[in-house]
Image (tube, grey):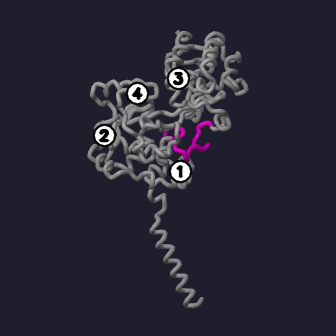
Amino acid sequence: MSMRASVCSRLGIAITILFALALPSRAAELPDATQRILADLKLDASVLDGLDRELVVPDAWIAGAKKEGTFRITGSWDPSQFTTMTAPFVARYPYIKPVFARGSNNDRALKPILAFSQGRYITDIVSGMEGNLPQYLKADALDDLRILPNAKNVPDGMKSADGAWIGIRIRYWCMSYNTDKVTRAELPATWEDLLTQTTWRDGRLAVNNLPQIWMLQLWGKKGKAWVEQYSQTLFRDVRPQLRKEGTNALLSLVIAGEFYGAIPSADYRLWRYAQKGAPVGWHCPTPVPSAVSAFGILKGNPNIDAARLFLNWLLSKEGQIAQFHADNATPVHKDLQTRSFLSFPDEIVGKELAFRDPSLDRLNDELMEIWSPFWQ
């Protein structure tokens, strides 16, 4: 090798080393908790491309969050799920200690607005407030979330145009069934089929008093007349068990064999039981009812910067993947709405969807006027 070629070779090696040092590997930059999540989900670190830009926030938020040191949130996660989900956040922002409480819809959405109306704060971030949203808007209680850099990652329709709320996960509300009592051949292809199949009649199907979770989407797709006729036939001919339990309790009763199936049931919650070998399956008649879980930040709360920092992180790729890892919630992030982030992709992909557009919330009272007399 000539001296000139040798010098060029050494120069090329030096440039390569300097370039590598200037651009450290993504794995070295990620918190250990994030690296473990990627390993558990068998995801390449490239799925987080662009994360550095997503985590850029105003310096004033960081300074304010350091002074506040905490934020409060009430949600539907199990405590262990919340801890798992927020491990990367805590690693990135060790000066913020999240305070989490698991609660019912009343705890998550109703009690915070009642307290706010009295000049008190019992939480900083409000979750699952869809049914109580009019009260929040009337009280002008919500921070404008358009200020969050990662709000741009959420598609239109999954966030409010005025910034009052934003979806942080997609929920699919279909039906659960006991696999020891029902075969796949007996599952209804459409919601109309559910009314005619004898498998589900005479108390073998259970429903609870939350039609807005699934029926409101079907109203948006099929109209009021369809909902009226469907409700009448469901209660008159199918005669389901009318249960006061919430969706999670209904799911446990399906597994126990109390009835053959239940409506509504969420994919993310059932998946965990199925993975553990419980005799339960999840099925979606078409169209598939879907919705986002609406989150908001209470205006003027004492931990406003920490709350903004957390919600912005939760909407980043890292936050969305951490949430999926913790409870199988389908991401709202526009780049993560793929088959890889669905608990039961074969029950959703390729099927017609019935999405709960926020404008449908205005029909909730009308829906209950139709539903309640049959329930009672």
Question: What secondary structure prevails in the magenta region?
Answer: loop
Badge number at residue 357? none
| Three-letter code for the amino acid on which mark 4 is drawn | Ala
Q: Residue at x 59, y 29 (%)?
A: 289
Dot 4: element: helix
For marks 2 and 1, give the one nearer the viewer.
Answer: 2
For marks 3 and 1, give the one nearer the viewer.
Answer: 3
Lower position in the chain sequence, tag 2 or tag 1:
1
Question: Residue at label 4?
Answer: 109
Lower position in the chain sequence, tag 2 or tag 3:
3
Residues in magenta, as a range: 324-344
Lower position in the chain sequence, tag 3 or tag 4:
4
Dot 2: element: loop
Q: How far is disc 2 from disc 4 in space, using C-alphas?
A: 18 Å
Q: Residue at x 52, y 40 (%)?
A: 156
Question: Residue at label 2?
Answer: 303
Dot 1: element: helix
Residue 174 at x, y percent in the picture: 60, 27
**Front-most of 33 and 217?**
217
**Front-most of 20 and 212?**
212
Residue 337 in magenta stretch: yes
Marks 3 and 4 in Cβ contact (< 8 Å): no
Residue 143 in magenta stretch: no
Left or right: 365 with respect to 196? left
| Three-letter code for the amino acid on which mark 2 is drawn | Asn
Question: Residue at label 3?
Answer: 212
Crowdedness of circle 4 by 10 Å Cα count: few (<14), some, many (20+)? Answer: many
Crowdedness of circle 1 by 10 Å Cα count: few (<14), some, many (20+)? Answer: few
Lower position in the chain sequence, tag 3 or tag 1:
1
Crowdedness of circle 3 by 10 Å Cα count: few (<14), some, many (20+)? Answer: many
Residue 107 at x, y percent in the picture: 38, 26
